[in-house]
Image: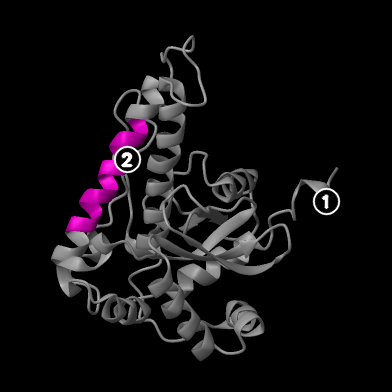
Amino acid sequence: MAGKSEKEIIGNFEVSKAGLVTRREILTMGAVAAAGALVTPALAAAGAASAPAPAGELYVAKDFSGLQGKLDGLSASQIEQHIKLYKGYIGKSNELRSKLKDVDLSTANATYSAVREMLVEQSFAVNGVIYHEFYFGNLGGKGGDPSGELKSALEERWGSIAKFNDFLKAAGKSVRGWVVIGFNTRGGFIDSFGLDSHNIGSPANFVPLLVLDVYEHAYMVDYGIDRAKYLDAFLKNIDWDVVGKRFSIARKHPMGAEATI
């Protein structure tokens, strides 16, 4: 990626060639773990890049078009439509952020008020951006098995990679939105969560490593309502190198505030 001779962009994190975690990485991982703050990832494995942000817009869509026509079992049309939806979340994230600057605070109310609605829907839009960027970023590989410390960690949690794959597919059939395999910074281990909506069930102190989108828009162009076939296709396209590098960085994140207070 141009301008990154001394650093490499992997997943949602920037890594120095020496493998050191920078202050920027720590701040970024904390924001991702909170799943509600700004994250603008650059995903090298998908060839992601962003255009300059229009004035006043903090969220900028990454270019995932390099995935179109490159995936086994996920067509160019399927990915194209999915990217359009992702860009919609970019637009709404910017719109809500802008409107919150001037929202009428005098009517604040927990049953209904403009500020309440904007805050809640901003969490939906922003998480829609974040999880899609993790999802597209862990596509583009050849599937198979992970390696190294990631493989060991998954085997420790699930017994074997085959059992992990079975779990991932079962989880994908069970939730309505997202399956997130990630690093629990509170406990220091790999964990898993299912989200029925972008902003429902998203855990704190949790760094996503492998993100699976199971909303119908992720597969209906290719598979209609046959989610099982889509899950098989997803497994064939996981980029384990990206997931492994995310894991390596996440493990260097401090284990929660109580470790330093």
Placement of 181 over or under 118, stated as above or below: below
Mark 2 burial class by Cα count in 10 Å: few <14, some 14-19, many 20+ = many
Q: Position of residue 19 (x, y in %)?
A: 62, 62
SS at mark 1 in the image: helix
In the rendered image, the residue lying farthest to the top is 106
Q: Depth check: give the residue in front, 17 or 217.
A: 217
Placement of 118 over or under 178, stated as above or below: above
Residue 153 picture quarter: bottom right
Q: Which residue is mark 2?
A: 90
Q: Relative to 8, is 185 on the left or the right?
A: right
Q: Relative to 31, is 51 on the left or the right?
A: left
Q: Which residue is mark 1?
A: 259
Q: Position of residue 67 (x, y in %)?
A: 25, 65
Q: Position of residue 260 (x, y in %)?
A: 83, 46
CB atoms at circles 2 and 1 under 8 Å apart?
no
Q: Residue at x 39, y 81 (%)?
A: 143
Kindly identify the amino acid type of the residue bearing the numbered disc 1.
Ala
Q: Relative to 57, is 182 on the left or the right?
A: right
**Magenta residues?**
81-94
Can you see residue 117? yes
Kindly identify the amino acid type of the residue bearing the numbered disc 2.
Ile
Q: Of the residues under marks 2 and 1, which one precedes in the sequence?
A: 2
Mark 1 burial class by Cα count in 10 Å: few <14, some 14-19, many 20+ = few
Quadrant the C terminus occupies: top right
